[in-house]
Structure formats: structure tokens, C-alpha cells
Image (cartoon, rainbow, N blue to C red):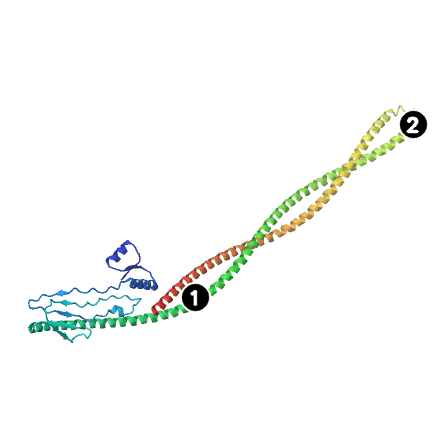
Amino acid sequence: MLLISGIVNDEVSKQAESCKADGVLKKPFQGSSLKDRVLDLLTKRPQKPAPLAEPIHIPMAEPPVTAEVALAPVLSVQEELPSIPLVQHTWEQPAEPVAIVMDQTPVVSVRSDEGDPKSGTTIQAAEPAPAMQADDRHQSMLADRDARIAELEAQLGAERRHSQEEREQHQLTVSEQREQLADLSSRMQAVEHDLAAERAQRDSMTQQLEDLSRQAQRVGEMETALVEERHRAEQLAQQAAESVRLRGRIVELEAHLEAEREAANQLVNQITSLEHVEDRMRELERVLASEREEAMALRNERAHLEKSAAMVPVLEEAGEKARAQVAELEATLTAEREAAAALLARFKQMEEKAQLVPDLEQELSAERDHSMQLTKRVADAEMLAEQSTRRFEDLARKLGEIAGLASQLGNVKR
């Protein structure tokens, strides 16, 4: 007898001991575990022979007559019936025959042929009168024995009927288990088909994950390239700002150059006028050489001319300096124009690259969206792979249970 409970603790164990249960079975449970438990209990159950009843001594006042009644051994119904693995039934053992022993005296041996052919009865009598009484007692004992035999035969018939019902139930159970086994076989084939599909899907998922990893690596390279392009764009922006500043400097230099040109033109005009003055001074010297008589009148003019002649080297030196400055300014202007042309070309290139920046930003946003989608697909693929692994483990466990049931059914058939 098994006690079925949802939990197993000390209190449940005490209840099992109080109701004399052979064990405790926790629910929910499977049929295979119940079957194994019942088979284990049937295997461990001891097959003890029923104890023989002690002899009953009946004292008699008259000369004693001894009657030994040996009943035929009653076959054990439990040994004839096959063990039913899923049904446990307990019946009472038939009572063993009772041996009646009386005090013996010298008697005459008489054998009776009544009763079971397998049992024998011996009646010994010493005198005719006690023999009749012993015969009556023997007849009553035979009647009791016949009644007992009829009762035992009725019990045996009931046990046989019960055994037949158990056999039919066992056959029905075996047929149901065969049907279940066929159903399980078909389900196993379906499961194997699903398993093959899951494996194919897992392979495709693995390929997709590899593609996603390659694409993720490419996204990293694109991000690195984008960072470099941003750095270049910042440099171009700095260069554009520098070119704007240089353009303003060029305007200032052009204005300063124009002012220097005007100053140079003025100096040229002054030098031209000085040359004319020098020619005039020479002419005046010739006039002075010819007109020495007018020296006193022209003394003041001569002093002035001398002062002018003293200023001529200074003016010539200033003219040379102005020419050098003009040449230097022209060289600087040429260099500035070349630098401005280079800056203008670089600025045009920067403008072209700046026009590419929105396209790069758009591509970057598209790549980010694509990477997010790829990340989501990778997460979905990992989830599907985990679900496939769980389903594979469940299928393996179910296949193990099916194999256990099949082996147990094979043992039952044996």
C-alpha cells in the first residue's frame, strides 16, 4: 500500500507509518515511477510460509482414541497468479489445516476412503464401543473437513475469477500500452522531424549570426571612418576660418600696398622734380660761372642751392629705400596672391567636402539604424537558439522516458 501526497515531510512519514503504508509517493508522478515502485515493493515482499497451528489436546474420560487428520495441502493462490505490475491486491491466506492429537491406547487400525484422495485418515480403536464413538467423531470431523474444503474451493474459485479478471485487466492494460507505444512512436517520428527542422533552422541562424558579426565589424570600420571624416571636417573648418582671416589680411595688405604705391608715386614725382632741380642747378652753375659778377646777388640763391644739393643724397637714399620697399612689397604681394590662390583652391575643396558631410551624416544615421536592427535580430536569434536548446532538452528527456517505458514493457512481456 502506498500513500500519495503532494508534499513529503516528517508528518507525512508518520501518517504513512500509522496507516501501515509501505511507502510514500509524491505527486505529480509518472506511470513509470509508480510501476517501478510497485515492482520494487513486490520484489522486497517476503514469501513467508503460514505457521502451522499448534496441536489441540482433547482429554477423554473413556479409553482414548487417537485420530490424526491430515488435510491435503492448499495451494497458494498467490504463487499461481502472475504478478500484475500496475495493480496491487492483497488477499487473506487460507487457514492451514488443524492437527488434532488425542492420547493413544492400544487400538485397532481402520482406514477410511472418504474425503480428499490426497489425504488419509487413520482411526485406531481398542474396543467396539469406543470405536463407534470415535467413528462418529471422525464422521463429524470429515463433515467439517468437507465443509472447510468446500469453503476453500469457493475461495479458490473466487480467487481464480479474480485472477482471470486481473489477467483480462492486464491484457487490456498491455493493449493500451501498446497503443500508447505506437502513438509514442508516431510522436517520436514527428519529434525527430521537428528536431531536424530545428537543426536546419539553427544552422541558418548560425549563418545569420556570422553575417551579422561581419556586418557589425563593418559598422565598426564605418564608424572609425566617420570619426576620421569628422576630424577632417573639423580641420577643414579650421582651415576655412584661417582662409577667411587670411582673406581679410589680404584686403588689408592690398590697402597698405595701394597706400605704398601712392607714396612711391609721390616719391617718384619728387625725384623727378629733384632731377629737374639738379638740371637747373647745373644750368645755374654754368650761369654762375659765366656770371660771376652777379655772385653777390645770387649768394643767397647759391646757399639755397647748396642746401638743396645737400638734400639730394638724402632724397636719393630715400628713393632707393622706397624702391627696395616697393620691390619687397611686390614680392610679398606675389606670395600673398599665390597663398590666396592656394587657400582659395583649398577652400573650394573644403566646400566640396563640406557638401559631402550631410551625405555622410545621412549614411551614418542609416548605418546606425541598420546596426540597431542587426542588434535586435541578433537578440532574437539568441532567444530562438535558447528556445531551440530547451525544446531539444525536453525532447531528449521525453525520448529517455519513452525508452524507459519501452524497456519496462519488454520486461513485462518476458
Q: Position of residue 307 (x, y in %)?
A: 83, 27
Residue under the image location 47 percent in, 59 percent down: 385
Q: Viewer-nearest of labels 2 and 1?
A: 1
Disc with the residue nearer the chain's start (2 vs 1): 1
Q: Position of residue 18 (x, y in %)?
A: 24, 57
Residue farthest toward the right in the current orientation of the protein: 290
| Quarter in which the N terminus is drawn | bottom left
Q: CA distance from mark 2 to mark 1?
A: 139 Å
At label 2, the amino acid type is Ala
Q: Which of these two is toward me, 331 or 197?
A: 197
| Label 1 packing within 10 angstroms: few (<14), some (14-19), many (20+) | some
**Residue 216 appears in the picture as rendered:** yes
Residue farthest toward the front in the current orientation of the protein: 106
Q: Which of these two is toward me, 325 or 34?
A: 34
Residue under the image location 71 percent in, 44 percent down: 339
* SS of the residue under disc 2: helix
Report whether 381 appears left or right of 317.
left
Q: Position of residue 196 (x, y in %)?
A: 47, 65
At label 1, the amino acid type is Val
Report whether 59 appears left or right of 335.
left
For label 1, the residue is 191
Q: In the rendered image, which quarter is residue 363 located in?
A: bottom right
For label 2, the residue is 289
Q: Position of residue 142 (x, y in %)?
A: 14, 73
* SS of the residue under disc 1: helix
Q: Considering only vertical position in the picture, is 217 above or below 154?
A: above
Q: Which of these two is toward me, 172 or 283?
A: 172
Report whether 311 appears left or right of 367.
right
Identify the mark at residue 246; answer none if there is no mark.
Answer: none
Q: Which of these two is toward me, 119 or 51?
A: 119
